[in-house]
Image (cartoon, rainbow, N blue to C red):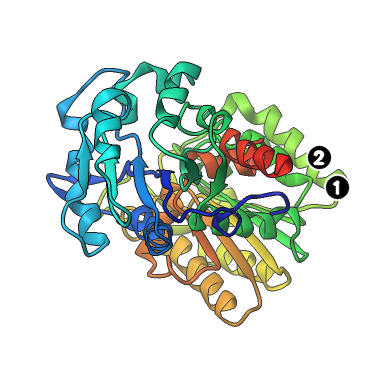
Amino acid sequence: MEGLRTLDDIDVDGKTVIVRADLNVPMKDLYMTDGLRIARLTPTLRELLGRGAKIVLLSHFGRPDGKFDAKLSLRRVNEVLGAALNRPPLAFAEDCVGRDAEQAVAELEPGEILLCENLRFHAGEEDNDPAFAKALSRLGDIYVNEAFSCSHRAHASIEGITHFLPAAAGRGMEEELKALHRALDKPERPVAAIVGGSKVSTKLAALTNLLDKVQVLIIGGGMANTFLHAQGVAVGKSLCEPDLADTARDVLAKAKRLGCTVVLPVDAIVAPALKNGVATRTVAIQAVPKDEMILDIGPKSVAEVLTQLERCRTLVWNGPFGAFEIAPFDQGTTAIARDVAERTKQSKLLSVAGGGDTMAALAKAGVDTKLSYVSAAGGAFLEWLEGRVLPGVEALLRQGQKA
């Protein structure tokens, strides 16, 4: 991405580097249940250590609302992070600002890492308080943002601190931004977007922005039901937002004006309830029983999606096609995911996906490592789809323009 400062542009030898990470990882007791974010963080940490830097790690964990909460201490993550780096638990500071933190930094040696306590124990973090941001900046000489998943927030450790220190993107942030840039800003056409999930209301801005950028828009999940309803198709007891029918019709009308092909389900897997072992059947989309609900797309819909993807060179994906958590309602998403992975392997498709449910669905299909790029970001990825400027990214680009 033009103007982005990276690790290649900074001298870190003998310097203390503040790395803003996203260590808000899912934990069960003392065990991490998903290590993707830490796995993507470690290359930057290893590179900085190899170049003679001291590292101060900053992160939030949970939502403590600006107050100390022992259950949300980053001590829980410390041992896990050390193991990922093949090290013992890292040095730990009981606070992220003030005397305790600054003293812990002063005791660091080159090649060592200090993990500071939860940023969100201070209200100044989410308020982007300049005084709190300046206090954070006292912990180091250089700032590196390695938390794309938090960069849609104008928080002190994301945006505010860049006003006080030279800043650059870490390797994970750099890789993510390059992937996103290739997918929508400078794509190889035709471009397709899969937008699924439960509600139109949460994805409306993304749909509107994507219409100007893609040639094929594939709508799945519960939100497809609202579009079907808007066209006069009865969807039974399915999840639907009838009050957004006019909005759905506006989206379809805009797509037609722009020459964008919209793909909606033509058949569906239905059942009387969403639960294990329930009886299911496949029906045409115009024949959904009034006492049943759509829980996945049917085989004809899968075939239509794959036909549309055959002519595309780039794919952006956010949201599953069905209630993939419960079999057999994962079959539509799984079939499409595996086909996308195969096309990616054959260099026929650049595939970029993101969002928590999407990641989980791809993992269940066994292809979460087989797309061109899978983002661990949730809100940041969605806001990127919406065409918003992310404060954390804007801050890095601002610094790059000054350099």
Residue at point 22%, 65% (across, down) = 86
Q: Is residue 203 left or right of residue 86?
A: right
Question: Is residue 228 visible in the rendered structure shown here?
Answer: no
Residue beneath the point at 46% across and 36% down: 239
Residue that lies at the very extreme toward the bottom in this rendered image? 346
Which residue type does callout 1 highlight? Leu
Residue flagged by tag 2: what amino acid is it?
Answer: Lys
Q: CA distance from mark 1 to mark 2?
A: 6 Å
The reply to whether the C-beta atoms of the residues labelled 1 and 2 are less than 8 Å apart is yes
Query: Quick one: quadrant of the C terminus?
Result: top right
Q: Which residue is mark 2?
A: 254
Tell which of 345 and 250 is nearer to you: 345
Considering the image in quadrants, where does the N terminus appear?
A: bottom right
Secondary structure at badge 2 equals helix
Q: Position of residue 143 (x, y in %)?
A: 49, 41
Please give left or right for residue 106 compared with residue 355 in the image.
Answer: left
Spot occupied by residue 99 in the image (x, y as percentages of width and height): 27, 24
* Left or right: 337, with 250 as reference point: left
Q: Depth check: 265 or 258 in front?
A: 258
Label 1 sits on a secondary structure element that is helix
Counting every numbered tag in the picture gives: 2
Q: Which residue is mark 1?
A: 258
Q: Nearer the viewer, residue 40 or 82?
A: 82
